[in-house]
């Protein structure tokens, strides 16, 4: 099976990056979002990515023009998937939203279409039965930003046909990623199994009053040689996702500290429009966050 037409469902920060990366590597991409505001924001992201790729990644104007021509946008799900060879889902990390989305997607997608989820926290087997094609359903998880942290974690569930697992491995490679095959379901894949505990402990240190977020980032960056600290990473991931994960995990485990942390994130950041890098401010202000200043680590 040859993949030519790809639908990206969910036009948020990461969904827009996936769409750009896929179109840049020669695929026809349909960007779907349930809301016009999401489509508008995605177009703004893509205009910014065009400037970024020309300014710092050596892209020619012709290459950018070709990429933009391969991107189309819609709020109509039936229109979005009518020719899709593969769907990449990046809808919000809530079970009810994902369940509803896959039930609708199954109505409209052609039989040929492979469904992939970019979910960071939910296993494919959790909602495979909602897809109507569990053998063609698996996870393809992207890191942020897609073109720098360019791993594509491909994880099957017990009902995934190995043929489609191999097709998605090849697809990940063809859009410029390093495929990371995951043969057994693992919450958090490889990347988030390592990353989520780091970000969670960093939040505990900060919201628990142990240290300030700049000092926590400095500690991590100096000690490990990392280019960015946990709170810079949180700004990239986005406050809404971090809030959703904290609330979900806190509720699931009855962890009141985690629930209180989620409440603080909502009140002190989300409610004030500080959603992270995508809105120009989270813990740091963008496009020139303090952690990139030469003296930050001194």
Image: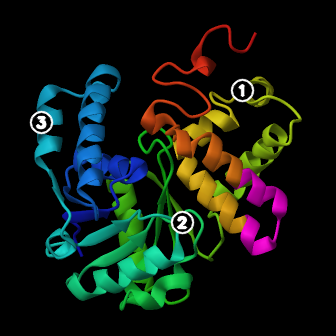
The answer to whether residue 169 is visible is: yes
Residue 177 painted magenta: no
Q: Residue at x 12, y 41 (%)?
A: 66
Q: Residues within 10 Å of mark 2 (few under 14, many from 20)?
A: some
Dot 1 falls on a residue whose secondary structure is: loop
Q: Is residue 27 above or below residue 277?
A: below
- Is 19 above or below relative to 109? above
Magenta span: predominant SS is helix
* Image quadrant in which the C terminus is located: top right
- Hey, which residue is sitting farthest right in the picture? 210
The crowd level at tag 1 (other Cα within 10 Å; few <14, some 14-19, many 20+) is few
Relative side of 160 to 120, left or right: left
Q: Residue at x 46, y 41 (%)?
A: 145
Packing grade of label 3 (10 A; few <14, some 14-19, many >=20) is few
Asked if residue 254 lies in the magenta stretch, the reply is yes
Label 1 – label 3 distance at C-alpha:
37 Å
Q: CA distance from mark 1 to mark 2?
A: 27 Å
Which element is circle 2 on? strand
Residue drawn 49% across and 45% down?
144
Give the vertical position of 125 relative to 69 (above or below).
below
Residue 267 picture location, percent across and down: 63, 46
Mark 1 or 2, closer to the camera: 1
Residue range highlighted in magenta:
250-262
**Residue 71 pos. (x, y %):** 17, 51
> Which residue was labeled with disc 1?
225
The residue identified by callout 3 is: 65
Dot 1 or dot 3: first in sequence order is 3
Q: Nearer the viewer, mark 3 or mark 2?
A: 3
Indicate which disc residue 181 carries: 2
Mark 3 → mark 2, Cα distance in angstroms: 33 Å
Query: For residue 253, which quarter of the picture?
Result: bottom right
Horizontal side of 80 relative to 121 (left or right) equals left
């Amino acid at each position: 099976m040859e993949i030519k037409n790809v639908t990206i469902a969910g036009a948020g920060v990461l969904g827009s990056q996936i769409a750009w990366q896929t179109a840049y590597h020669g695929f026809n991409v349909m960007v779907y979002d349930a809301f016009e505001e999401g489509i508008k924001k995605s177009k703004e992201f893509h205009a910014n990515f065009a400037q970024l790729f020309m300014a710092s990644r050596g892209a020619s104007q012709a290459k950018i023009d070709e990429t933009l021509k391969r991107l189309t946008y819609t709020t109509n799900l039936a229109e979005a998937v009518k020719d899709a060879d593969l769907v990449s889902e990046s809808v919000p990390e809530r079970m009810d939203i994902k369940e509803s989305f896959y039930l609708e997607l199954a109505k409209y997608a052609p039989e040929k279409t492979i469904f992939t989820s970019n979910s960071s926290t939910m296993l494919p087997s959790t909602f495979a039965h909602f897809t109507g094609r569990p053998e063609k359903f698996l996870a393809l998880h992207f890191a942020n930003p897609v073109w720098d942290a360019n791993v594509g974690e491909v994880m099957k569930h017990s009902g995934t046909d190995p043929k489609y697992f191999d097709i998605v491995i090849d697809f990940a490679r063809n859009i410029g990623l390093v495929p990371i095959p995951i043969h057994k379901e693992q919450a958090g894949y490889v990347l988030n199994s390592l990353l989520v505990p780091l970000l969670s402990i960093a939040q505990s240190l900060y919201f628990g009053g142990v240290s300030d977020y700049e000092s926590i980032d400095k500690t991590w960056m100096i000690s490990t040689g990392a280019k960015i600290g946990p709170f810079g990473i949180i700004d990239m991931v986005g406050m809404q996702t971090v809030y959703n994960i904290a609330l979900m995990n806190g509720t699931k485990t009855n962890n009141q500290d985690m629930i209180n942390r989620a409440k603080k994130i909502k009140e002190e950041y989300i409610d004030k429009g500080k959603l992270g890098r995508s809105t120009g401010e989270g813990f740091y202000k963008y496009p020139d966050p303090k952690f990139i200043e030469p003296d930050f680590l001194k």
